[in-house]
Amino acid sequence: MITVEEQLKKEPVVWYRVVIAIISLIVIFYVGTLTIEFKGVNQKGLEIAINIMKGIFHPSIELITDLSKNGLLYMLLETIAIAFLGTIIGMVLALPLAFLSSRSITPKAVNRTGLLAISAIRAFPSFVYGIMFIKVTGPGPFAGVLTMSVTSIGMLAKLMIESIEDLDHGVVEALDAAGCSTIQKIRYGIIPQLSSNIISIVIYRFDVNIKQASILGIVGAGGIGASLIFAISGMRWREVGAMLLGLIIVVLIFEYISSIIRSKLATGE
Amino acid sequence: MIKIIKNIFLPDTFTLSNGKVVKEKFNWGPYITIIVIILVAICSVITKIDIPLFIKRSYHFTTMIQAMIPPNWSFMSTMAKPMIATIMMSLIGTIVAAVLALPISFYCSSNPAFKLNKQYLTVHRTWLGLIRTLPVLIYAKLIALIFGSGTLSGTIAIAIFTFPICIKMMYEHIETVDMGPYEAMLSTGAGRIKSLRCSVFPQVKGYYYSTVLYNFEMNVRSAAILGYVGAGGIGVLINTQLTWRAYGNTGLMLFVLVITVIIIESTSRYLRKKLV
């Protein structure tokens, strides 16, 4: 007969883990206070916070209804276009890289180099690419497209590698046994297995890219970012409100559509 | 020839030897391809794509990279402090967000054992989703106006942005957890919080730590650009050095950043593999 007390005594002793966790948290926060300086709330801080809220609830109607190139709708369209083209070009660049760095296809030396290259591409902040591409193309949405396509490579390739490594080799072997040529094996053995995964990865990245493209404007690479930051710096809160609202709505719409498409792809519809 | 083109867009029919007609499955592929090509064309007009210009001037890209090599090592002393600040910003921001997110994620999961009603869940998930829609840089810009520019604003921005992501990742996981132990503990007379802590938390613990690590990894990368809007960290330095065309210094900063990110990434990947 096991009593409750006996069972309780058998419980592993874990108090030292809690102590270690607390000590390391204290150390982290102590080092943090050395580097993160607290200057106190800006004098106008509260007023600004209230103004931001007011602006979001009273967005500037003139900006929303302005259909010219300075209007909200065109800026959003440009942002979406940058994200879309960036994702497509990123996919084209990421696919070969993903195949090269999958463990199940290439020898170890090749896939290690590929993975390192992907990590290195990912590690640079997007703004640095933005500034570099502006040197090439001049400020404008074209630089944004190039930046988006390079920054998408990392994540796209990483997710693609996972689905490539999950490929079922039995299918290819069966096609081999049936006497198919290499092209036929790729067409009927590999593409049907990969396509839905890759499409869903690309759609997911497109979602992320819309958010990314909306801030690229800060370095002058097109999209809504530049006007948004200028409006915030200029404290034109009603314009800020309109832009934030537009951005939120666009992101939500695309998130909704992409979640529908991705769940259909996942269930194999 | 016409038949081949027709077969691409419309399903082919075969008549078998016994007279049975077999129809191919309808294929959306070609239609989607055409739509994507049209969209690409429209978008390249909007974004003023100019391939010849890119090819003609692409040497600017390589000359800039060449100017960064070799990096200017003497700049190390200047950049050490902002670099540490960048890491600390993301570390503290992530920890604060993760600690706050844990209890709330329990009350956002649609686990039947918690008996939370649908409307309540929808309301909370919606406002958390709304926070997630805006990029972290915009929060940083707004918060820098309120709290003054500096690393504090960056930390708060990171915390605000990480909070809903942590909650989303956690509640999706909590929904899959085995609720038997929780109900067993409730039936022995333990309170709700105690039963959550002792029966549900041990099951999600590994995933929780791995979520925190993952978010930290993401945040180090995004903290590096927060400086552009005055929210502290290495971004300020990268920005000024690039505008002064001090490519040697920029090269060093990027080099250190890449190494740091890769080290953090591989450590976190190793730890996460152990945890889950």
Image: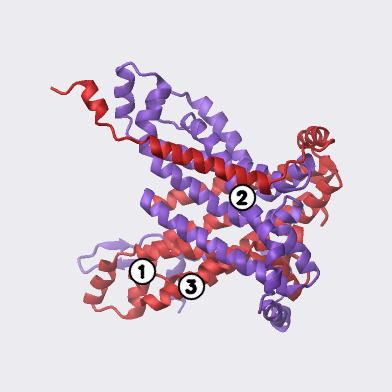
Under tag 2, what secondary structure? Answer: helix
Q: Residues within 10 Å of mark 3 (few under 14, many from 20)?
A: many
Q: Is residue B176 visible?
A: no
Q: Nearer the viewer, mark 3 or mark 2?
A: 2
Are tags 1 and 3 found on a single chain? yes
Amino acid on which disc 3 is placed = Leu
Subunit of label 2: B
Residue corresponding to mark 2: B88
Are tags 1 and 2 found on a single chain? no
Under tag 1, what secondary structure? Answer: helix
Residue A248, quarter of the rendered image? top right
Subunit of label 1: A
Mark 1 and mark 3 residues within 8 Å of each other at the beta carbon: no
Under tag 3, what secondary structure? Answer: helix
Amino acid on which disc 1 is placed = Ile
Residue corresponding to mark 3: A97
* Whole-number angstrom distance, CA of label 1 to CA of label 3: 17 Å
Residue A190 - label: 1
Residue B222, quarter of the rendered image? bottom right
Colour of chain A in the image: red
Subunit of label 3: A
* Whole-number angstrom distance, CA of label 1 to CA of label 2: 45 Å
Q: Quadrant of the N terminus of chain A?
A: top left
